[in-house]
């Protein structure tokens, strides 16, 4: 009733009939909706335009970032290639300094050298020299690995050559003593806080007497005879490093050799390698068991076996240190 009264009242004011008024109202509503839709569409188009502009700007930014990232990746790849090329060149120099396995085989026909740098270059090195009717062989493990270890190995190899070939020293304990003094002097360790040094296992063979003289700086010597492994302990201080002030000389141990004795010199990398089903270290005990278990093999076969064994042990685990094992059968 109120709606009808309102319509009559408006019709009287506008001087038109109620039905005409209704048509006017409907027309106004339609026109209003039309303009509202047009306004909404225009606003929507504006928002789309703003969004497209933002997307366009962001696309340009992303493309710029992509270009910069690709350029940076190219620079990194170039630097990595330069570094790898330099390391490979250093590897060739290091390999040239190390004694050729053929030279060792000419003296010890039953022998192998397992040499596995963690990186391209190694902090482990070995030495082989014939001097004054003695055959001197050493296995050294320098501080660190990679470039730092390789530099130390080059210094150590050079100093050992000087001590044995230039000074004519063939006594293992004295060689290590002179090497210790040489490292301290070369690195000026009496004047700075450098802790760099090396652990060394060194043997001098007298083949006529069937005798071996061993001296070690933190590295033992293992000999397997008739299936039993005998470990000869080293002195508990390294060459150089923290022990620059030690006054003790390195101890010589004389060992009478027997036919078929198998001698092993090695760095700590093999036993310290993580792997296996539980991802743990191989450990010295397991390393000994492996060596004892392969005594029926030739030395070449032993070298191949040890290489494959440690690769299988590692699996997908990264190599944690340089690995070196030298085996000699009398």
Image (tube, helix red, strand yellow):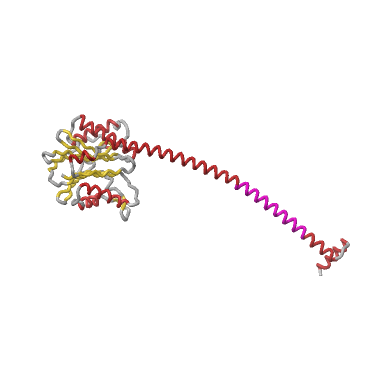
From this view, report whether residue 276 is shown above or below residue 212.
below
Report the quarter where the C terminus lies. Answer: top left
From this view, report whether residue 132 is shown above or below residue 298.
above
Residue 237 visible in this rendered orientation of the protein: no
User: Which residue sits at x=23%, y=42%?
Assistant: 219
Instruction: Please provide the residue range marked out in magenta.
Output: 30-55
User: Which residue sits at x=81%, y=70%?
Assistant: 1
41 part of magenta stretch:
yes
243 part of magenta stretch:
no
Q: For this view, does 141 lie left or right of residue 4?
A: left
From this view, report whether residue 49 is shown above or below residue 1.
above
Q: Main secondary structure of the magenta part?
A: helix
Q: Nearer the viewer, residue 85 or 14?
A: 85
Q: Position of residue 80 (x, y in %)?
A: 41, 40
Q: Position of residue 71 (x, y in %)?
A: 49, 40
Residue 24 visible in this rendered orientation of the protein: yes
Q: For this view, does 93 lie left or right of residue 229?
A: right
Q: Position of residue 11 (x, y in %)?
A: 86, 63
Q: Position of residue 296 (x, y in %)?
A: 18, 52
């Amino acid at each position: 009733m109120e709606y009808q009264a309102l319509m009559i009242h408006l019709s009287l004011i506008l001087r038109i009939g109620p039905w005409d008024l209704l048509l006017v109202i409907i027309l106004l509503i339609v026109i209003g909706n039309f303009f509202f839709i047009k306004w909404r569409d225009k606003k929507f188009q504006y928002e789309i335009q703003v969004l497209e502009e933002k997307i366009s700007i962001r696309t340009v930014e992303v493309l710029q970032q992509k270009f910069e990232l690709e350029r940076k990746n190219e620079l990194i790849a170039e630097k990595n290639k330069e570094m790898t090329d330099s390391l490979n060149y250093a590897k060739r120099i290091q390999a040239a300094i190390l004694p050729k396995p053929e030279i060792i085989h000419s003296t010890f026909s039953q022998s192998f050298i397992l040499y596995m740098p963690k990186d391209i270059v190694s902090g482990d090195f070995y030495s082989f020299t014939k001097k004054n009717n003695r055959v001197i062989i050493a296995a050294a493990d320098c501080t660190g690995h990679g470039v730092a270890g390789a530099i130390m190995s080059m210094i150590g190899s050079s100093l050992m050559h000087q001590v044995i070939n230039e000074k004519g020293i063939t006594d293992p304990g004295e060689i290590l003593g002179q090497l210790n003094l040489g490292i301290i002097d070369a690195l000026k360790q009496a004047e700075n806080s450098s802790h760099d040094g090396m652990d060394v296992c060194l043997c001098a063979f007298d083949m006529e007497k069937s005798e071996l003289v061993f001296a070690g700086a933190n590295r033992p010597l293992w000999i397997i005879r008739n299936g039993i492994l005998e470990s000869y302990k080293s002195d508990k201080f390294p060459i150089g490093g923290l022990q620059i002030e030690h006054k003790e000389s390195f101890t010589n141990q004389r060992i009478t050799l027997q036919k078929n004795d198998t001698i092993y010199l090695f760095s700590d990398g093999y036993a310290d390698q993580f792997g296996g089903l539980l991802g743990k270290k191989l450990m010295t005990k397991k390393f000994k068991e492996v060596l004892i278990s392969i005594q029926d093999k030739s030395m070449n076969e032993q070298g191949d076996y040890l290489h494959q064994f440690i690769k299988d042990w590692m699996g997908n685990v990264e190599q944690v240190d340089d690995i070196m094992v030298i085996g000699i059968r009398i």
